[in-house]
Amino acid sequence: MLHPDGVGLIKGAECKDYSQIKHKILFVKKNKSYEFNLGKNLNSDLSYQFFETTFCDYSAARITSIGQRGIDISLMEDGDYIIKCEIACAGISLIKDMTSKKEINTQSNFQDKIASIYNLSDKIYLSINSLNRPILHKIFEIKNKWIKDNKLHYEGIFALKGVDIKDWGDATYYLYLISNDASYLEKIGLSNKDELKTVFPDHYGNYQKAYFCSIG
């Protein structure tokens, strides 16, 4: 069961009770989408939280599942879905991508599947994957390398599943050069790549700084 909790409103469109605003949650991927009606929790504080120049009552803009029973996602196909919200209020209907001010990265398993919710590039995603599918446990890939002016440059991805590398101090990378009669060890740097937050197919963990590169 998925339990949404958020706010969906149209600026300037009053929604002081349940009858004035309707919400749906949409899960959208290529060639497939699902939608579910949402419930509400009245919250008068929203009127002050989103106050601009004129008072507008947004008390019914707080969204949740109907009866707070959760949304059954067990019949949804495997894949990565963008989560959207449809809002209908005051004769206006619009669909917007759901967003979050906080970082989201959580997983839960059901039946033979694992579901992950995460945010990336100002969107929130739901990923559903079968646990029976082979999953990589290590990713090592050289993305670029060159030699110029007696300097050697390497950069790429090195991530181990379950070992989060989301902050600068979470890992240290070294370049180790070895020949038949000599060896050389040099510390190299890290780079932030948002697309690596969910580099593994089941989106478990956060690896956004699992990108190594020569310093400078």
Image (cartoon, rainbow, N blue to C red):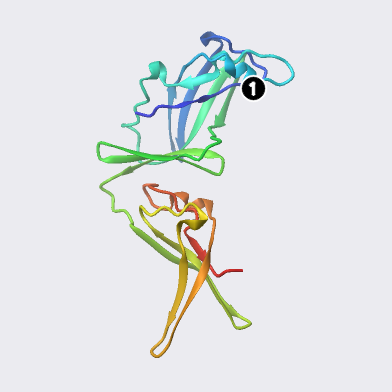
Q: Which residue is drawn at 41% across and 59% down?
A: 159
Q: Is 184 placed above or below 123 here?
A: below
Residue 11 rendering spot, x and y as whole percentages: 65, 21
Mark 1 lies on residue: 50
Give 216 or 126, whichever is nearer the viewer.
216
Extreme right residue here? 53
Q: Quadrant of the C terminus?
A: bottom right
Q: Is 37 placed above or below 108 here?
A: above
Q: Residue at x 28, y 50 (%)?
A: 133
Residue 59 rendering spot, x and y as whole percentages: 57, 14
Residue 13 rendering spot, x and y as whole percentages: 64, 16
Q: Quadrant of the N terminus?
A: top left
Q: Is residue 152 left or right of residue 52?
A: left
Q: Residue at x 46, y 70 (%)?
A: 174
Q: In which quarter of the image is residue 90?
A: top right
Residue 160 rendering spot, x and y as whole percentages: 37, 58
